[in-house]
Amino acid sequence: MRTLKESIKVKSFNYKKHNDYSWSMIIDLDRCNGCGACVIGCQAENNVATVGEEEVGKKRNMHWLRIERYIEGEYPHVKVRFLPMMCQHCAQAPCESVCPVYATYHNPEGLNVQVYNRCIGTRFCGNNCPYSVRYFNWFDSSFPEPVNNQLNPDVSVRERGVMEKCSLCMQRIRRGKDTAKDEGREVQDGDIQPACAQTCPTGAITFGNINDHESKVYKMAHSGRAISLFEEKGTHPAVKYLKGGTNDVIG
Amino acid sequence: MDRRSFLKLSGVAASASVVGACSRTSQNVISFVEAPNDGANPVDGDWFATTCRECNAGCGVIVRTVNGRAKKIEGNAIHPISRGKACARSQAAVQTVYHPERLTTPMLKGAGGFESIGWDKAVDVISQRFTEAEGKLFYLNNGANDASSGIVNEIFGKMDGFLNVGNSEPGFESLVAGGAALADSPRLPFPDLDHAQFAILFGADIFESGPSPVFWGGSFGECRRGRASVRGRLVYAGSRLSSTAAVCDLWLPVPPGKLGLLALSVAQVVVDIIISRKLALTIPRNALGRWSEVLKDYDPEKVAAQLEMPAEYIHKLAIPFVDESPSVAIAGADVTGHVNGVAALDAVEFLNMLSYEIGREKLRIHERLTPEPNEGLKRRITQALGVDHEAQGYKRMVELVDGMEQGKYSMGIISHTNPVFDTPAGLKFKDAMSKVGFTVAVANFMDETAAEATLVLPDHHWLEGWSVQNPNFVPGVPVLNLQQPVIRPFVDTRSGSDIILAAAAAAKLKTPAASTEEFVQGKVKQFRAEMLGAPAYLGDEEFFRHLLRNGGWWSSEIENEPTPTPPDSVLWEYRDKLKAPEPEFDGAENPFYLHPFQTVHMGRGQGANNGWLQEAPDPITTLMWQFWVEMNPATAAKLGVVEGDMVKISSAHGSITAPVFPYKGIRPDVVAVPIGYGHTNYGKLATGRGENVMTLLGAKQDTDSGAHAWRAQKVKVEKAQGRMKMLRNAHPEGEYKGEVFQL
Amino acid sequence: MASIPSADRCVYCHDYIKADAPEIVKVMDHYNGDKPIEWVKVFDLPDHVWFNHKRHIAKDVPCQKCHGPVETMDVVSRTNEFSMGFCLACHQENEAPTDCWTCHT
C-alpha cells in the first residue's frame, strides 16, 4: 500500500509534468507599505462582503487579503513590518485533504480552488489551514439594493454556510487565457494580473507562470530573497515572499 | 432625463451568477431601453478613462462598466500621477456611487427643516439670490482646480466682493511657500524619490496624507527595489511611527516642532563635507562660506540635546546624504503642522538644493526648479480653472470666516467640502456660516456642512459628471485631467456646475458656457495649441475625444531635463532663510502634544460613510470600524490605562473621549488621534462613530504662510469611565494561531 | 451568459417592419414610454456557474446544440435541461476542459 506521503508526491509530480501553467505570486515585503489598496481592490473584484462592526467583533470579517502587521523592538528602536496574507495556494494543501465533499481541490495549474456549490460548510478546511486564510459565510452576503449594482458579474456571490477564500482572481486568469486563445498564442508574462497585483502602488505584488523560466516570478522566486511561509510544514505554497532588507543607517 | 425608473433596475449579466441559490427571486431579465456604451462585448464590459476625485491628487483612473454599471476602478497606466495604480479610497468609490444614502433631490430649508423642491424651483431660487447678491458671494470648494471652480470664477470673478476659496488639506500653503523659496513662483516642492538612493523624510506621511499617496507609493517602490543593484534607504524623523515611517529603515522620534532644527543640523554637516572635500559644485564658493557661517549654530553637538538624540546620529544622516547621492529630503505634516513650518521647509529645500548640486544629472525631475516645456502653461491652466495656489488654504479660510462674521456675504456656495466638520474648533466656521443669509451646499451626501446650508443640491458622483481638473501636485509636467461620465446618473442628480450655469443665465449674468461639458471642451480648445505632442491633424471634436480616451493631456517631455542651479542672487541671500524658530503651542501648559493624523482610509472624513473603508483595517493599529487614541505603553502605564480603556483628551477648545491603543511607535509625550471620525450627520455608518479631533484644535497659524498649525496643540489626558473592546484584525483562530512569521 | 439587447435595438428595424403587429406595438410602447421590458428568462443557468458564449461560438458549436431548434419556435421554450451533466457530456466528447473552475467561480 502506498503511504499518504507517496501518493501526494505522485499527485504533485503529475501536475507539474503535464501543465504549461503553474501560477505563482511573489510579494516583495521590502516594497509593501501597508496602504491597503490591495485589500479594497480584492474586495471590489471578488464581491467580498462586509460584515459590519458587530460581526467584526466576533472576528468574522471576510477580507480575502489581509495585511498582517508586526511590531518589533522597544521604543525608540521600533520596527513595524507589513505582510500581505492571502490563500497561499499550497501545492500540498492541508485544507484539501480534510474536505469531506471535495469542495476544495487542487487544479492542474497549481491553484487551490474552492467550489462553492459543492461546499457544505463543515469548516474543516478553515481549521486545518495554517495561514488562517479561509473565511466562512456566517450569513448571506449583504449587498442590499442599490449596492449590488457594483457586483462583478464574473464572480459569484457566496451565500450563507460556504467557505470562501482568495482564488488568485481566477476570473482574470481565465480571461487572460481566453484572450490568448483568441489570438492563438500562449499567455505571456504580465498578461494576467490579479486585482491586488494590478493595484499595488509600490509594485510589491507580481503574478505569473512559474513554469516559464523567463517569467518575472520565476526569476524572483530564485533570487535568494524568496521565502515561503511555514516552510517547515511542507505546504509548498505557490505564493512566495521576498524578504526585506534591514541595513539600518544607524545601529 | 427621466431614465431613473429603468436605471434602478439591474442589468442582465449579473443576474445569472450573482443571485444566490437561497435568495433566487426572479426569473425575469430586465433590459435597457437604450443600451449603455459598454463596448463590443456587453458581458466583458468596457473600460473608460476618467479622473478620480476622491481627493485632489488628480490620479488618472480607468473604470470598468458592465451593463451601464460601474464595476471596478483601476489606475490609468499612462497617467503620470497614478501610473496605473489606485489607492483604497479611489477603488471604494464604487460603493459611494451606489450608496443607499445618496442625496436624490434638491432640498430647501424651511420652517420645519429641509423640504424637497424640484430642480426647476432650485434654479429659480438660486438665480434670484444671484441677482440679489450682486457679487457679494463666496465659493468654497475642496481646493480642486476644476471645472466648477473655473465656471464660478468666470461668472463672478470680476465682481467686487466675490471670494473663491479652497478648503485644501492642512499645510498646503506652507508647502507652496516652502517651494517658492528657491523658485520664482509659488509651487509645491517635488523631490524625485524615484531616482534617490537615500531619503530623509521629515515627518512626511506620504502614504497617508496628500498630495498623492499613489504617486508616492510608486516612487517608493522604484526607490527601494526598482533598480537591480541599489536598495534605496529611507529615514523617517517625526514624533509618530506612521505607516510611511514603517517602511523606512530607521525612525527617529524627534520632539514636535524640531524638524527644522534637525534639517539645519544635517545641512551644517553636509555643507562642511562639501567644503572640506572640495567637491566641485556649480554653487559659488563664497555662498558656501556664508552658509557655513550661519549654520555654525546648528552644529550637531550643539543641538543634539534639543533633538533628544546623540550627535553622531546627525552625522550618520548627513554622510550618506552626500555619499549615497542622489539623495532627497521630503517634508510633510509634522513640519507643516507647526508654527515654524515654512522656516523648516526652507531648511529642507536647502538640503534638496545641495543634494541636487551633488547628485547632478542623476535626479531628473524637481518641481521647484524645473523649467516647463512651455513656460508657465501649468500656471495658466491653474488660473483658468479658478483656484490658484494663493486662493487656497487656511489663511483664506480665516479671511472668509472674518468676511462672513462682518456680513460681507449675502450668499455662499460650498461645493464638495465639509468645513463644519474638518476645520479646527478655533476657526468657528459653523458660527460664521450661520451669519450668511443663503448658503448652497453642492454634495453627494448629507453631511455636517450641508445640514447647515439653506439649499442642498445633490451633485453627480464623479463617475457620472463632466469636469476638467488641474492637479495641485504634479511631477514636473503640466497636466489637464479630464473627468467624463462613465455611467449615466444613477439617481436624479444634476451637475452642480450645470445648475450654477443655468441659474446665472436666468439671472442675466454672463456665463462662460451653456453646460459643464461645453466648458470642459472650451478649456481643451483654449490650451490645445500649447499642448505638446497633440496630434495636429485632428479636428477639435476628434481631439477632445482623443483626450477623453487618454483621460486628459500631460506632457512627458520634462523628464529628461536636468535640474538647473538656482540663480546666484537666490543662493547668496539664502543665508537669511536658514533659521529654526522655536515652535509655539496652543495650551502650552498641558502635558501632552496632540498629534492628529490622516489615515489611508478616512481622508479628512469623507471615507467614513463607506462600509469598505470602515471595515478595512487601519495599517498600524489594524482596527476596524473604530476610533482610537494612540499613546506610548509607558504613557498608558503612567495614566493607569490598558488597551481599550477610555481616556478624556481635553484642550481649551473642547474635549473628546477615545479608547486607548498602546503603540510603541510614538513618543511618550505625544498622543495621536486619527482625523475623520466623529461625524454627527453623515449617514448611518459614519454618524456617532468616534469623536472629532478637530474640536480640540485652536487657531494657531504658521508665522510665515498662515497655514493652520494643526499639530501645535497641547492637551490634557486623563482616565475616563468605560472600556471598549478593540476590534483588531485577527483571525478567528486567535492571533494567527500564536505564531509569528520569522522574516 | 449573455445580454438581452436593449429595446432601441428592436426599434431600429421594427419601426418599419411589421410595426403594426400587436407584440411589436408592445415593444414600441416600452420604448416610447422609457419603460424597460421585463423579459421572461427561458434559458436560466444554475447559480455559481460562469458561462461565456464566446468560446463556444469560436468553436462553431451550433446554437441549437444547447438552445434547441429555436428557428422553428414561435414562442421559445427550453428543450434541454442546463444541468452539469448536459455541459459535461459535451465537454468530454469534444475534449474541452473539465476542470471545476472552468465553469464554477
Image (cartoon, coloured by chain):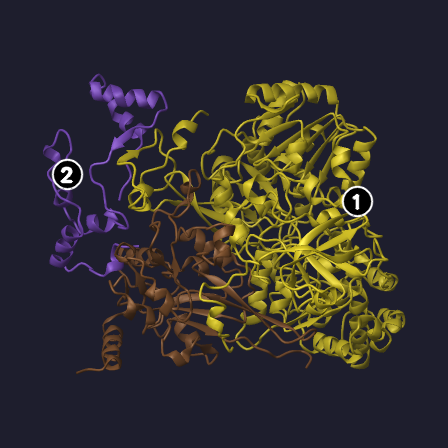
Which mark, by number, is residue B387?
none
Task: Please name which of the two marks, 2 or 1, marks the residue nearer to the observer.
Answer: 1
What shade has chain A been given? brown
Q: Chain of mark 1?
A: B
What shade has chain B been given? yellow
CA gap, disc 2 and disc 1: 71 Å
Indicate the amino acid at tag 2: Arg
Say whether residue A195 is visible: yes
Whole-percent x, y for residue B174 in the image: 76, 53
Indicate the amino acid at tag 1: Gly
What shade has chain C been given? purple
Numbered disc 2: secondary structure: loop
Which mark, by number, is residue B426?
1
Whole-percent x, y for residue B302 in the image: 87, 75
Q: Residue at x 79, y 41 (%)?
A: B398
Which mark, by number, is residue C78?
2
Out of A129 and B364, give the one closest to the viewer.
A129
